[in-house]
Amino acid sequence: MKLSGPESVRTWLQATKISFLIAAALFLSIDTQLAFAASWSGTSAISPALQPDPRGGSQINDVAVNANGLTVAAWDQYNFYAPVSASVGIAIQSGGRWGAPCTFSGNAIPNPNTDGSPGRADNLPCTPTSSGITNFSMTPKVAVGTDGTIAVSWTYQDATQQGQKVQVAVKPAGSTMWTGYTLATFTPGGVSITRSVPVAIDASGNVTAAWNVWDGTRNVVQAATLPSGSNIWSATSTLSGQGHDGLYFSLAVNAAGDAGVAYSLSPCATFG
């Protein structure tokens, strides 16, 4: 089905997964609203002061809340002073109280293995400060499951290399430890875009992530799922069609684990 513009709408089906292709501060503060409450709570400052220039404060952030009120927020933390860097800050609210924020950096997570399976870092540290970070972890996304499983994702780039990595940190329900994964690596190309890695969690605690990578000629939209209680991700599924250049996208997962991915189809690889 064609749209009047240069982008198109298509569908892809596989098992229970359904994807739709559609055309498409100095510190972070947050307001929360309790279920059935008549008004929002007061604002809570949940990140440290980051930069004196407001343009260098938290610019990209995300938040997720589960049915029990467990709330997770994440934000990017740029440092414009030497060494220039970026990291991901997170804070968790449980029982109506925010915990101390901490920082993720992807340099501790290894690359995917030679068989293509994700690289894994057990007991991934979430440090109290971003001091000393030299590389770039950017564009965070978060999800929290009904069971309390938490996932935080970002894109990572070494300061001395062009290549980027797709990374996710997962804290299973009832655990105090994070495990970090590198799901894919690539060298960006084509049109310049801001990349992110949407994550979602179903009622059983299964974590699904979606991302896109440049394969040398086009952006390929991919996804994979980490089953609850496991540290082995499913094989990566390629969702974009042959020759399609898939750009901006989003992900949704329902309680049963059915997933939907929506993304824009660039005309660059399929027109002309």
Image (cartoon, rainbow, N blue to C red):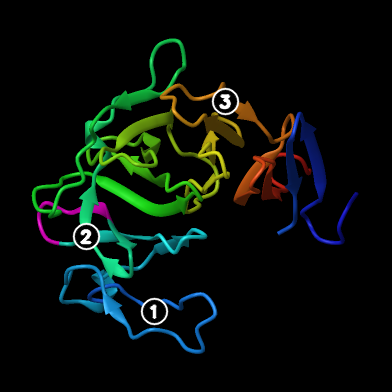
Q: Is residue 161 above or below residue 194?
A: above
Q: Say which residue appears at 15% left-offset and 47% top-offset.
A: 133
Q: Nearer the viewer, residue 7 or 172?
A: 172
Disc on res. 236 = 3
x, y percent for residue 188? 45, 38
In the image, what residue type sits under mark 1? Answer: Asp
Which quadrant holds the C terminus?
top right
| 172 sits to left or right of 102 | right
State the SS at label 3: loop
Q: How many marks are shown on the rendered structure?
A: 3
Question: Are there few (<14), some (14-19), or many (20+) residues within 10 Å of tag 3?
Answer: some
Q: CA distance from mark 2 to mark 3?
A: 32 Å
Q: Say which residue appears at 27% left-offset and 66% top-offset.
A: 98
On whether residue 131 falls in the magenta region, the answer is: no
Comparing marks 2 and 3, which lies closer to the viewer? Answer: 2
Q: Earlier in the sequence, mark 2 or mark 3?
A: 2
Q: Which residue is mark 1?
A: 31
Q: Are marks 2 and 1 in contact (CB under 8 Å)?
A: no
x, y percent for residue 109? 28, 30
Q: CA distance from mark 2 to mark 1?
A: 16 Å
Question: Which residues make up the magenta segment?
Answer: 81-89
Question: Are there few (<14), some (14-19), or many (20+) residues within 10 Å of tag 2?
Answer: some
x, y percent for residue 241? 74, 33
In the image, what residue type sits under mark 2? Answer: Pro
Quadrant assignment, res 96: bottom left
On whether residue 84 falls in the magenta region, the answer is: yes
| 181 sits to left or right of 218 | left
State the SS at label 1: loop
In the image, what residue type sits under mark 3? Answer: Thr
Q: Which residue is mark 2?
A: 101
Q: Earlier in the sequence, mark 2 or mark 1?
A: 1
